[in-house]
Image: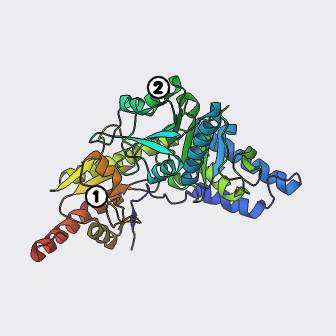
């Protein structure tokens, strides 16, 4: 059966341009890019070309790009490096402090909690943080402020530029988690002025196992992974050249001929349609900021229906979707993002589009979602329980 993949926010299918570049690299490149023989130098040229391509997409200098295995590693490296820097700066004694918003991804939250003390800044009902409240949480021992560009569950975009500017005035590092934003909105790392920015390769149509941490020029951080001088001694380990070539190809494709803007506009058109469908259904609410949002995802609250049944019903109808709510994914806990927003954290549905999405995918949702909800609610009425 033809299927509709609407889980691009989790991982996006590999773009053909990335696959073609990877296959060619696997055929042609075998050398360690750290060696000076011909095979090594060919790999080095390919690696640095990929670095320039990723930098071009993100508005960074190529030397600011540190390749990693993905956003999770990038986040851990940013957190560890910022905290270690603070501990060794000016003979600092005592615990190191960090600030993060209540809707950060668990990779940020858990890395920060493991590294030291944290202050969590609340958000409003749309999932948006107040700049003033972020600044109020900063203290003398604050090593870094973590703020996501856009939320991974509801899509709300944070006032990143304002937070970065205010933190720079106070001499506090800022790490921006742009895993959901990269490849979906325009990013100008140099113009933004952030110190650290983490991205994921597979979420923008590059290969899994690739990512990058952007490190502002002049900022020196201790590496998370040690044991070699790869990535200019900022991340040890042999680089997966073919995979990074694929990431570079995806980045270059998006950065050429206004393709990113065109793709983002198409994604927003499709998610606008999804929001219109939701508005016409009883007991269904759209979460997140309706204006300040990423273009590719929609989060719906579904009253009286458990997410597992909805996901299974949609899957049976040929639709791949996701929920951050209880028991629907790896976690057994209610969604911390939705809980922080003050909405039902137990029953949600996330639909996310991407480069391969079409109107036919939305048409399938328009048919399958009402039928699935009606069937589950009928079962609940007959059994006297929640569906």
The reply, left or right, for residue 259 in relation to residue 383 is right
The image quarter in which residue 328 lies: bottom left
Which quarter of the rendered picture does the C terminus lie within?
Answer: bottom left
Of all residues shown, which one is farthest toward the front?
Answer: 94
Q: Which residue is mark 1?
A: 348
Q: Is residue 234 above or below residue 357?
A: above
Q: Is residue 308 above or below residue 28?
A: below
Q: Is residue 1 above or below residue 196?
A: below
Observer-nearest residue: 366 or 158? 158
The reply, left or right, for residue 338 in relation to residue 161 is left
The reply, left or right, for residue 336 in relation to residue 219 is left
- Gap in Å between the C-alphas at discs 1 and 2? 34 Å
Of all residues shown, which one is farthest toward the bottom?
Answer: 383
Q: Which residue is mark 2?
A: 166
Observer-nearest residue: 43 or 135? 135
* Element class at badge 2: helix
């Amino acid at each position: 059966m033809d299927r509709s993949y609407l889980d691009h926010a989790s991982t996006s299918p590999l773009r053909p341009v990335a696959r073609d570049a990877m296959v060619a690299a696997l055929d042609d490149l075998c050398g360690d890019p750290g060696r000076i023989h011909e095979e090594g130098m060919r790999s080095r040229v390919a690696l640095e070309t990929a670095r320039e391509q990723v930098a071009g997409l993100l508005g960074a200098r190529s030397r600011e790009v540190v390749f990693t295995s993905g956003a999770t590693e990038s986040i851990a490296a940013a957190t560890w490096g910022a905290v270690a820097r603070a501990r060794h700066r000016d003979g600092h004694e005592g615990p190191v402090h960090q600030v993060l918003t209540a809707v950060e991804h668990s990779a940020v939250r858990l890395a920060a909690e493991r590294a030291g003390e944290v202050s969590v800044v609340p958000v409003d009902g749309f999932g948006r943080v107040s700049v003033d409240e972020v600044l109020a949480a900063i203290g003398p021992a604050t090593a870094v402020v973590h703020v996501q560009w856009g939320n991974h569950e509801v899509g709300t975009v944070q006032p990143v530029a304002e937070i970065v500017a205010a933190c720079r005035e106070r001499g506090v590092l800022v790490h921006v988690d742009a895993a959901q934003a990269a490849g979906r909105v325009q990013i100008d790392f140099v113009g933004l002025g952030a110190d650290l920015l983490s991205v994921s390769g597979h979420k923008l149509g590059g290969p899994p196992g690739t990512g990058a941490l952007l490190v502002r020029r002049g900022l020196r951080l201790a590496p998370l992974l040690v044991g070699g001088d790869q990535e200019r001694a900022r991340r040890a380990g042999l680089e997966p050249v073919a995979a990074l070539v694929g990431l570079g190809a995806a980045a270059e494709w998006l950065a050429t001929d206004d393709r990113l803007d065109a793709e983002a506009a198409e994604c927003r058109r499709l998610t606008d349609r999804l929001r219109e469908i939701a508005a016409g259904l009883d007991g269904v609410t759209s979460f997140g900021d309706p204006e300040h949002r990423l273009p590719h995802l929609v989060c719906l609250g579904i009253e009286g229906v458990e997410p597992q049944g909805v996901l299974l019903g949609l899957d049976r109808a040929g639709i791949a979707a996701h929920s951050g709510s209880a028991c629907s994914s790896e976690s057994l806990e209610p969604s911390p993002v939705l809980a922080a927003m003050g909405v039902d954290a137990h029953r949600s549905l996330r639909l996310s589009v991407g480069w391969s999405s079409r109107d036919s995918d939305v048409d399938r949702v328009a048919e399958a979602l009402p039928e699935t909800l009606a069937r589950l609610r009928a079962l609940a009425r007959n059994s006297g329980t929640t569906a």
